[in-house]
Amino acid sequence: MLEPLRDQPAVAMPVFGSLLGAMRGARALWIVLPLAVTGAPTAYLSGRLGVVPVAVFLALAVPAVCWGLRRSIPWKAFAELAREAPFRELSLPPEGLFADGTKVYFRLPDADAWAEARLPKAARLQLQAQRRVWLLGPDEKGRRFLQLPGVLWPHRMKAVPDVPDGAVCQEPVEQRVVPPEEDVVLTAHRQRIVRWIRALFAGAVLVFIALAVAQVAAVVEDVTRVGSGIAVLTIHSIVFLVWGTEAVKGMLKPLPRGKWTELVAVPHRPPQIGGTGLATLACRVQWPNGWWSDIFLSKVDPALAADIFATQRIWILGEPFRGATTFAGVPGHAVLGRVRFN
């Protein structure tokens, strides 16, 4: 399993340094892109169609920019810490984990305080079973982060004086390899991915509708404006929807039933991390009968690529066969991606 390296800066972790480098540019993109997408149409429409279209675009821009700032600022602090400090492993005692809704609490080893972190359901279930975390920080502003075994993405946490009254002690759960359809961590992680994809496309559809309404309003007001810039933006939104649907439709397919299949996987080269934070990896795998063939992972969770690169093993959901495109992951971990067998 992928783990940080002890007594070394966090960036020494396999693939982790590449991920930080790739996300350096993404931090600016999270802020600049919403401004560019909404600001240009707003400037164009303000002089032509009045206040209503401007209000619509601003209503879309403000949440998008706030989301970008929320992601960008903590990631910058995390990257600075990762270049200087190592991760520290912490094992939790059986009675040392509490939960209150989406927040978890455990005692910090270096302070008379408790850690509070908001985690998605899959991460909470993984932590409840494993009882191990890797901690980074605090920095000079007291910011702290945690990382779960086998997962690259960090989570913010903070120190609080005590556990809230409503928190419930989380009993230990036996961790064992079960069929994918019974893996509660994998199921919760899959549900979160599907929700994010649907929310993204719902936002894209809303933008498309707003552009279409603005175009109709322009034509009604003056038929000579039929060729205005709104039409270009509408075409762009249609292209985005078509391209995006093609890119993510595989992740919306049902997970294969059956069992996990573990194969030897020898990467041709280290994973390549794109500006979106997704990874690409090509490997040569050995089948149970001794034959070798190539597999390709494109635009997958970097944790999946990093786990394969670090362990030279790949876990396939169900029974793989040549020429198939199916799912791969890590049993009991919030890691999932698509893999294509050549």
Image (tube, grey):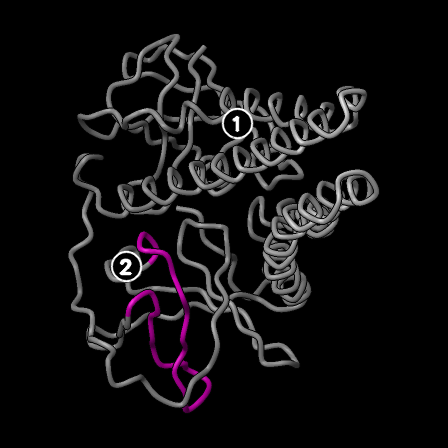
The magenta segment is: 101-123
| Badge number at residue 267 | 1
Amino acid type assigned to the residue bearing label 1 in the image: Pro
Quadrant assignment, res 259:
top left
Q: Earlier in the sequence, mark 1 or mark 2?
A: 2
Amino acid type assigned to the residue bearing label 2 in the image: Gln
Mark 1: give few (<14), some (14-19) or many (20+) Cα within 10 Å: many
Residue at the image position 50 percent from the left and 56 percent from the top: 4
| Badge number at residue 49 | none
Residue at the image position 50 percent from the left and 67 percent from the top: 156
**Is residue 60 among what the camera can see?**
yes
Q: Secondary structure at mark 1?
A: strand
Mark 2: give few (<14), some (14-19) or many (20+) Cα within 10 Å: some
Q: Nearer the viewer, residue 91 or 169?
A: 169
Q: Secondary structure at mark 2?
A: helix
Q: Is residue 76 above or below residue 195?
A: below
Q: Which residue is mark 2?
A: 130
Residue at the image position 78 percent from the left and 40 percent from the top: 45
Quadrant assignment, res 268:
top right
Quadrant containing the C terminus is top left
Residue 241 x %, y %: 55, 25
